[in-house]
């Protein structure tokens, strides 16, 4: 019986760029910036990397359809490189594949890297049409990301009898906290503190989501180097490394796409993925 990847893989190195409007940097520049930091953190030579996974969604303006830009840019010749794409979980898929390939014993040391140049796409979160097939059910012709999450907020309030004022208060608290954290992070895109009063008074984007409740559009890259606990101990000596306790992704079969009587007040997939992750990690009382 399968028993997951709990304690079978560890992260020995991580690196990331400064996020923001990186007009002066190409996707390749961002990959190098993150990789150099990651390699230094891992304390290994790049020739020790046996395989790599590249996550990028807007490939048309980033790196193209192939995975060659990673091997060519980072000078990692003749190793297998796979490009992943899965909307917001794109780089997570790269990381997941790296973990599974090490846990399976196929490779000893693997790189996972995600990169995106959203500013160069002109992407602003606006709809691009419904498309064909399943996509037409997932996102209607005039649906935006803020619009979808706004509907979630109003449905949640209606189901549990929570006023929009209280929901706005809760969201403002979260946004203020996140901006405060950004001030402390030199690599964050938005590094300006915003009060809860300013957040609630900001222009409305999709009721009840205001300007500061919505994500910014950013350029950046991040990467991690994965190996086994045994190899990590031999490489890192007394230095710390991060054990991977669980890794789960859940895809919908249609409940969030109006194929059922889903009430719109929560994401079924979030609950399913969390449940599976806690089970894999052996956590019985999450809090």
Image (tube, rainbow, N blue to C red):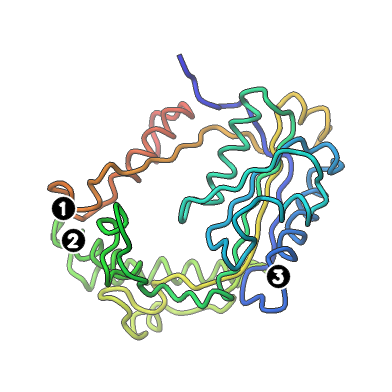
User: Which label lies toward us, 3 or 1?
Assistant: 3
Name the residue carrying label 1. 263
**Left or right: 173 as drawn, with respect to 81:** left
Name the residue carrying label 3. 26
Numbered-mark total: 3
Q: Residues within 10 Å of mark 3 (few under 14, many from 20)?
A: some
**Left or right: 88 as drawn, with respect to 285:** right
Q: Residues within 10 Å of mark 2 (few under 14, many from 20)?
A: some
Q: Which mark is residue 155?
A: 2
Who comes first in sequence, dot 2 or dot 3?
Answer: 3
Q: Quadrant of the N terminus?
A: top left
Where residue 195 appears, as percent x and y from the top left, is 44, 79
Asked which secondary structure carries label 3, the reply is loop
Where residue 216 appears, as percent x and y from the top left, is 49, 73
Asked which secondary structure carries label 1, the reply is loop
Does residue 217 sit above or below 162 in this rendering?
below
Who comes first in sequence, dot 3 or dot 1?
Answer: 3
Q: Residues within 10 Å of mark 1 (few under 14, many from 20)?
A: some
Tell me whether circle 2 and circle 1 mark residues in contact (CB < 8 Å).
Answer: yes
| Residue drawn at 37 percent across, 71 percent down | 128
Where residue 34 appears, as percent x and y from the top left, is 73, 58
Cα separation, mark 2 vs mark 3, equals 41 Å
Q: In which quarter of the image is the C terminus?
A: top left
**Left or right: 31 as drawn, with respect to 94:** right
């Amino acid at each position: 019986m399968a028993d997951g990847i709990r304690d079978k893989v560890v992260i020995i190195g991580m690196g990331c760029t400064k996020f923001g409007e990186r007009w002066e940097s190409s996707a390749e520049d961002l990959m190098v910036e993150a990789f150099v930091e990651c390699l230094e953190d891992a304390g290994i030579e790049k020739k020790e990397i046996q395989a790599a996974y590249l996550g990028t969604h807007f490939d048309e303006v980033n790196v193209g359809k192939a995975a060659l830009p990673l091997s060519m840019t980072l000078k990692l010749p003749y190793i297998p490189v796979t490009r992943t794409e899965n909307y917001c979980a794109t780089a997570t898929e790269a990381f997941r594949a790296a973990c599974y390939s090490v846990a399976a014993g196929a490779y000893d040391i693997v790189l996972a890297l995600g990169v995106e140049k959203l500013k160069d796409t002109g992407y602003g979160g606006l709809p691009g049409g419904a498309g064909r097939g399943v996509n037409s059910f997932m996102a209607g012709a005039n649906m935006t990301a803020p619009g979808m999450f706004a509907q979630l907020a109003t449905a949640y309030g209606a189901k549990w009898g929570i006023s929009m004022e209280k929901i706005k208060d809760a969201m403002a608290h979260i946004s203020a906290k996140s901006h405060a954290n950004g001030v402390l992070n030199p690599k964050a895109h938005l590094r300006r503190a915003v009060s809860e009063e300013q957040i609630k008074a900001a222009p409305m984007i999709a009721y009840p989501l205001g300007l500061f409740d919505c994500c910014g559009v950013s350029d950046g890259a991040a990467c991690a180097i994965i190996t086994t606990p045994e190899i990590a101990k031999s490489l890192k000596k007394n230095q710390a490394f991060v054990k991977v306790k669980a890794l789960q992704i859940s895809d919908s079969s249609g409940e969030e796409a109006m194929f059922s009587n889903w009430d719109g007040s929560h994401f079924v997939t979030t609950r399913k993925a969390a449940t599976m992750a806690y089970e894999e990690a052996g956590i019985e009382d999450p809090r």
